Amino acid sequence: MKAEKIIRLRIQNSTFCRRIRVVQGDTGRIFRFILEDITMDGSEQARVYAKKPDGTEAYNDCEVVSSNEVLMESDSGQIFAAIGVVQAEIQISKSGKTITTYTFEFDVEKSLTRAGAIQSSSEYGALETAIAKAEGFYNPTFSEAATRNNINSGESIPTLFGKVKKWFTDLNTLIKLVGSTDISGIGDGTVTDALSVINNNFKNNPTFSLSPYKDKTIVTFGDSVLAGWGWKEGTGIIQPLKEKYPDATWINKAESGANMAVTSSPAHTPIVNQITSYTGAADAIILNGGVNDKNNGLPIGSIETNYDASYNTSTFCGALERSLQYIMDRYPLAVKLYIIPHSFGKDNSFLDSIYEKAIEICKKWNTPSLDMRVYSQIAMTSANKEAYTYNPNSKKGDGVHPNETWYRTFYCPVIDQALQYQGIGSITASKAPEVVAVTGVKLDQTTLTLNAGKSAQLTATVSPSNATNKSVTWSSNNSNVSVSGGKVTAKTAGSAIVTVTTADGGYTAQCNVTVNASTEVDHTELASLSLDGNCYFDTEILPDEKTNTKARWNLQSGTTYIAGARDDNYKIGYTCTDSIYAVRGTVSSAAKNAPFWADNWIIEQTGASYKVGDTTVATDAIDSFKLSSPYYLGNMSKNGAPAGTGVVGKIYYAQIYSGDTLVADMIPVKKSDGTLCLYDKVRKKYIYNAGTGTVTE
């Protein structure tokens, strides 16, 4: 007599393998392990190594029966001798080399079969039969004891049997309550205390549960995959688990369409804000995010080297790190799980880059990540898109948003196993952390005077000193002053108001900043600066119909945008491909071309006329216009951002006029600290490379 079970494993990567259930002491079981990613020739040796619940080790030799199958028979029963969880792995050996699977588990359940058991309808019935057989010897008369007491030497037969009857009566009651459940973890493990605990539980809560989530609070933050947009907003991974484990509190804060990072006008609550604004209880936190950041063109950013850093939450990396910092500080004992969704198509490379960063961040923050690109089980073929995903707008499968079937079949069971694997059932009861609200904020200086190019540090003090969330943001109402982390940098003459705002409560404090024109010259003039196509200088001048320009360039092959600005209504400036193209007018105005070859060029624009070397071209005449995007040198701005590849070559100088008045006269310089930049002799300010490229002499 043999009972065979087939188990599929992989050598190359671990899985959340469900435990294999067996019964204590079985010796007639056969386990056929199918190793899906290995090929054997039959000459290998295979062995199952196991660690039993008490820590002792055992092994079973196995038979290699095919190119990827190993057979184990439990003849000795040693591996399954004790109840509890047995950790195991398979080792394949050949010619001194070994390959070992990741750990999987056997769940050894207690056997109800015992040698010498008395055949009876109940334990008490068996006892009465035994008593009846003894009547010819003692023929005792007895009554059931009122309470359970230990048996003492020398007690009379009636007293002895009265105590035994009481024990069996209470034992039957316990069996009816818990069946085959191990009671060693209920109360102090004794029958007396187990009965007391169970009776009290039934009295206060009629549904007795051994759920690993009992009395726990599980909170989800993220985008549409966790929010459940392909099923119904607010369901997602929460609904099936909520139905399966009703004795837990399940909270879904995820919003469809949410970015991880913060944007100036988010349509949905950024995930970092979902997380950092949550102050309730949490025994487990599930989060995801990144797809919308990538789709919306938000910067990925970089990973900080330290834990306690000032994270740039306008980037994906900064926002995810800030989220995990908040979780670690506020909920250090909570189970944490970051979800990477399934592959939306065979080519998932568009999203792989952002998830590589996410995995690296999770490793830094000791946070488990669950990669559904591996565990979702379903590839997005045309048939599967329709069967397992759904887009409420198109009413069709889109390959992105799981429907109810997919959530219930794979997404939720895998996440359930992951949470249990991480220890959700072992943590202490949830308690909402104490929150101390912010009552105000002050600055150490309320007025500040700086020369252009200089900086000063402001310090904000949040009240009370023990406030839970002391995070603040900084802002300036004028572009002539910038502020980051309280460091105020003066750019050009004028005034500005710097404001600090608390994240909790929105309390503010302000500092009035006056910027004087700089009289210092801290540089050496250079003949030119070399640009590599990814450099540009923001003059901060918004062109209009009075703007005239003159500049000298060395333009080489590879140059595209040279100088200028463009917004949704107007454009001014010049570019280069096979010719040099000049433009001034509305967005629909055609560019006018002049000959081009790699060389030095002086390009001068006066009104609608451009002089390119010795060639003069006329652009569209336009009486009145003003751009909202600043004039760039080395590139052309497009709504405040570089339009594309800039100058490959050099800049010698650049001048900007308003009519006949010179408003900016910019020359290449090298500062005393080695920084290469432009210096505006009119505005007495330095203009630095704002691009990603490198400026050289």
Image (cartoon, rainbow, N blue to C red):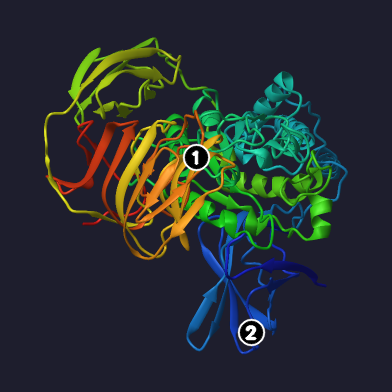
**Pick the front one: 466 or 31:** 466
Q: Is residue 107 visible?
A: no
Q: Which mark is residue 571?
A: 1
In the rendered image, the vertical position of residue 630 relative to residue 118, given as above or below: above
Q: What type is the residue that disc 2 sits on? A: Met
Q: Assign a secondary structure to mark 1.
A: strand
Q: Residue 304: horizontal and vertical position, in percent?
A: 36, 45
Real-space Cα separation, disc 1 to disc 2, in angstroms: 68 Å
Which residue lies at the image location 60% right of the left edge and 46% below the top edge? 295
- Quadrant in the picture for residue 6: bottom right
Q: Residue 612: horizontal and vertical position, in percent?
A: 38, 53
- Left or right placement of residue 324 versus residue 207 in this view: left
**Quadrant into which the N terminus falls:** bottom right
Name the residue carrying label 2.
40
**Quadrant into which the C terminus falls:** bottom left
Q: Residue 579: horizontal and vertical position, in percent?
A: 46, 60
Q: Which mark is residue 389?
A: none
- Left or right placement of residue 399 versus residue 285 in this view: right
**Which numbered disc, 1 or 2, marks the residue that appears first in the sequence?**
2
Q: Assign a secondary structure to mark 2.
A: loop
Q: What type is the residue that disc 1 sits on? A: Lys
Q: Decide: marks 1, 2 in contact (CB < 8 A)? A: no
In the rendered image, the vertical position of residue 150 relative to residue 437, given as above or below: below
